[in-house]
Image: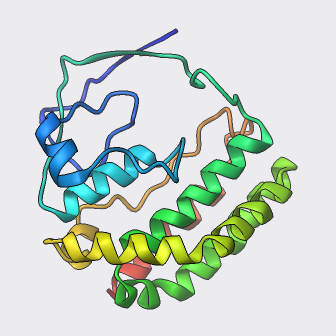
Amino acid sequence: MKKIILLSLIGTLFSCSRNNPITEQEVRDTILGMFDSFLFAYHDDLDLCWRAAMQDIKSYYIPSSIVYHPSEGFSFKWTDFKYYLLERNRQYCILTHYSRETYYKMLPALIIVEIGVFFFYLKKGVAISKIKATCNILKNLGYINKKYKKIQSERIIPDKKLIKTFEDGILIPKIMDSQNNDFFGSFIKNLSSFSRKFL
């Protein structure tokens, strides 16, 4: 077990890990609903917090909080299946949470990111996981569109306001990239900063 101590200052944040989200049952059950079963694992925490932010429900971090969690979770480790879920669920969140207007404005940057992610997966020897993830997204477009309409119909806060709270940086865990190559992270940060100008 890894002991995680949250040392940040008290304040709001956009998303928290599923390892430690604590929400009031009324908010979770009546306003947001539970974790999205389609996501199964990975980015389900992002989905819940993103939907909350869209409905102007704040997330907070508390410095006195202590969470005990294995560094890689209880299952999957860094297998092809884990990479598949990470990629599929990343695409799912993008397609269901951004408005179509925002999505199309971001499309050139998203295409560049897709190419970058493919080469990252290729480098890791799990490119087939990326391909399978994209195929699963295409297979489930009907469900994704239905989910998109529901999420968008419940939103209060527009993308433009939410995106201002986003960080441009991306941190790739050492376990994913043992060489600790910051090129991809730096590239994404610069691309994100540039893309914001068009939103």
Residue 61 lies left or right of residue 99; in this view the side is: left
For residue 148, above or below residue 24: below
Res 23 quadrant in image: top left
For residue 199, above or below residue 131: below
Residue at (50%, 71%) from the top-left corner? 144
Instruction: Name the residue nearer the viewer: 185 or 157.
Output: 157
Residue at (71%, 51%) from the top-left corner? 84
- Viewer can see residue 198: no
Colouring = rainbow
Residue 28 lies left or right of residue 46; in this view the side is: left
- Residue 128 coordinates in the image, percent (x, y): 85, 58
- Viewer can see residue 165: yes
For residue 119, above or below residue 22: below
Quadrant location, the C terminus: bottom left
- Residue 34 coordinates in the image, percent (x, y): 32, 44
Residue 123 lies left or right of residue 83; in this view the side is: right
Residue at (26%, 24%) from the top-left corner? 7
- Residue 166 coordinates in the image, percent (x, y): 31, 61
- Residue 97 coordinates in the image, percent (x, y): 37, 69
